[in-house]
Image (cartoon, rainbow, N blue to C red):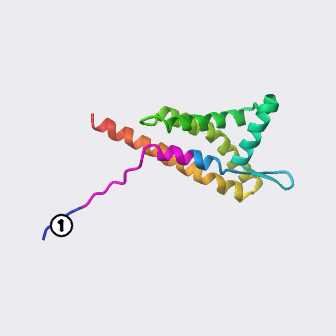
Amino acid sequence: MIVVKWKRKFEVNPKLPNLLLIIFSLFGYLEWGQGQHSFLFQAEAELFSKLVSNPADVIHPLTVLPFLGQVLLLVTLFQKTPSKILTYLGIAGLGLLFGMMVLAGIFGGNMKIILSTLPFLGTAAWVVRRNWKSRIHHQEGE
């Protein structure tokens, strides 16, 4: 009897992780004050409307850096092979905001905020691990 071992490797489109990071970054959830809450895509829309009328009100590191992170991730979607450096910089920019959201959720005891960050943070960890493993395998092949 012949035993055949099938080793199937699931190939992921290299742009898919960055697309997922962008999508998941839009669904972070924020709550503040009495009855005040918003998803990040709603907050971004509001920031864009204020950017036109009063840009000085919008310029803040916790708004600019995550936005730049999203832009960098968006740029990688138009590259033939997504740049790992741009991907890491995009994750770092968005990671600052999502890290603050996790801390706010923990200190405020708000599970909705914490849970809303998990898809982005989990995907970011997967991307970093995936890129790290591909770097190690590439070095072993040299």
Identify the residue shown where x is 74% and y is 57%: 110
Amino acid tagged 1: Val
* Res. 45 image quadrant: top right
Residue 7 part of the magenta-drawn span:
yes
Say which residue label 1 marks.
3
Q: Residues within 10 Å of mark 1 (few under 14, many from 20)?
A: few
Identify the residue shown where x is 55% and y is 51%: 122
Range covered by the magenta-colored residues: 6-21
Q: Position of residue 17 (x, y in %)?
A: 49, 46
Identify the residue shown where x is 71% and y is 42%: 44
Nearer-the-camera pick, 33 or 13: 13
Identify the residue shown where x is 65% and y is 36%: 67
Q: Position of residue 141 (x, y in %)?
A: 27, 37
Image height check: is 71 above or below 38? above
Q: Position of residue 70 (x, y in %)?
A: 60, 38
Q: Main secondary structure of the magenta part?
A: loop
The residue tagged with tag 1: helix, strand or loop?
A: loop
Q: Quadrant of the N terminus?
A: bottom left
In this picture, residue 49 sits left or right of residue 139:
right
In this picture, residue 77 sits left or right of residue 23:
left
Most distant residue in the left direction: 1
Image height check: is 3 above or below 82? below
Most distant residue in the right direction: 34
Q: Position of residue 15 (x, y in %)?
A: 46, 43
Image height check: is 59 above or below 38? above
